[in-house]
Amino acid sequence: MVNLREKPFYLNDRQIKWVEDTVNDMTLDEKVGQLFVGLKTEPGVDEDRIRKDLERSHQGGLRWQGGDMNTVYLQNRIYQQNSKIPLFIAANCDDGGSGCVPEGTFVATAAECGAGAGTENAYHLGYVAGREASAIGCNWLFNPVVDVYKNWRNTIVNTRSFGSDPDIVTANARAYIRGVKEANPNMACTAKHFPGDGVEELDQHLVMGVNPMSAEEWEENFGKVYRALIEDGLETIMAGHIALPEMSRKLVPGIADQDIRPASLARELLTDLLRRDMGFNGLIITDASHMVGFTAVSKRRDALPDAINAGCDMILFFNLSGFNSPQLAA
């Protein structure tokens, strides 16, 4: 059970009462809607449409595709103003503010930051990302990427990683987050993609990823990074559609090969390892639920509740355009 008094939340009694009263006042449909981050795929701002979408979806978060800075700012403001419960509005800012809108500032790739001496570049990367994402109404970054890049054939992580050394990845991720927090102390950060990409060369957009490390190797690399950031008070971790078979076998002796699932659906990885062993008390969100690494494992109507049962708090994506409420979790 998440403790709202402890890190990363540090809520006081008044704030916890607001949370509890808000949850108690929700309908079942509203509670279900809060599990989802909607994906707005149609450009433009239609306040009446946005209001109707919110009334039907009760979504907990928002991501979008397309739009210049003025359109996106107006869109995000209208969503926030019309949401009964304050929305998480998220952006991917791997390279700086350019991840938010086309007018945003490109600072550097993570690979460029990791290749340089010190962590000053990563700090500025986070600072610019935090400033420019805040300016268009975002309160949540799906960054930093903390994958440890061990396989040059992996084209998904590639320049998004700070490097192959877990100490360098940790130092730069901390600097990125420090920059974000100095730009906006209320901007939540997300480490991804747990349990770790960059070792094999599968693309989770097309197939379930598999991290082949032994449990000991994983602890020395990805475990080292995540444990450090959790200790620092990281707010969010994104669960990738990546299996960690040797860790699953360690945590569930005798588990059959066909029962080894990606982290986004693996209770032993999210609840037993991440929550209980590593002490993570923040929010766990799936990677994009449209990806084949998630949908190929089971039918969507089964995978979504399985992700929640595994330990995820939110599901990334349902389409906001053209959906109807009964099919929200279909």
Image (spheres, rainbow, N blue to C red):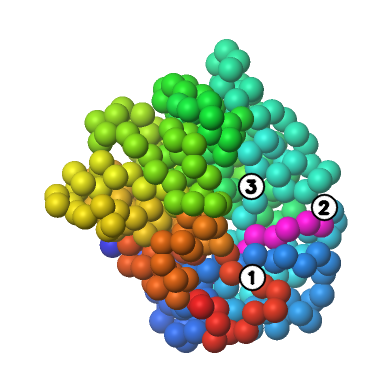
Residue 76 in the image, given as x and y percentages of width and height: 73, 63
Residue holding disc 3: 92
Residues in magenta?
60-67
Q: Earlier in the sequence, mark 3 or mark 2?
A: 2
Question: Residue 136's spot in the image, x, y percent?
Answer: 75, 53
Ranked by sequence position, the earlier of labels 1 and 3 is 3
Q: Give, as a three-letter code, the residue at label 2.
A: Met
Q: CA distance from mark 1 to mark 2?
A: 22 Å
Q: What amino acid is at disc 3? A: Asn
User: Judging from the image, what secondary structure is the residue with disc 3 in?
Assistant: loop
For residue 312, which quarter of the picture? Answer: bottom left
In the image, residue 117 sits, relative to residue 158, either above or below, namely above
Residue type at mark 1 is: Asn
Pick whichever, 66 or 149, lies toward us. 149
- The answer to whether 41 is drawn above or below residue 136 in the figure is below
Q: Tag on residue 69?
A: 2
Of the residues under marks 1 and 2, which one precedes in the sequence? Answer: 2
Task: Decide which of 204, 22 is in the foreground and name it.
Answer: 204
Residue drawn at x 57%, y 73% is: 59
Q: Which residue is mark 1?
A: 319
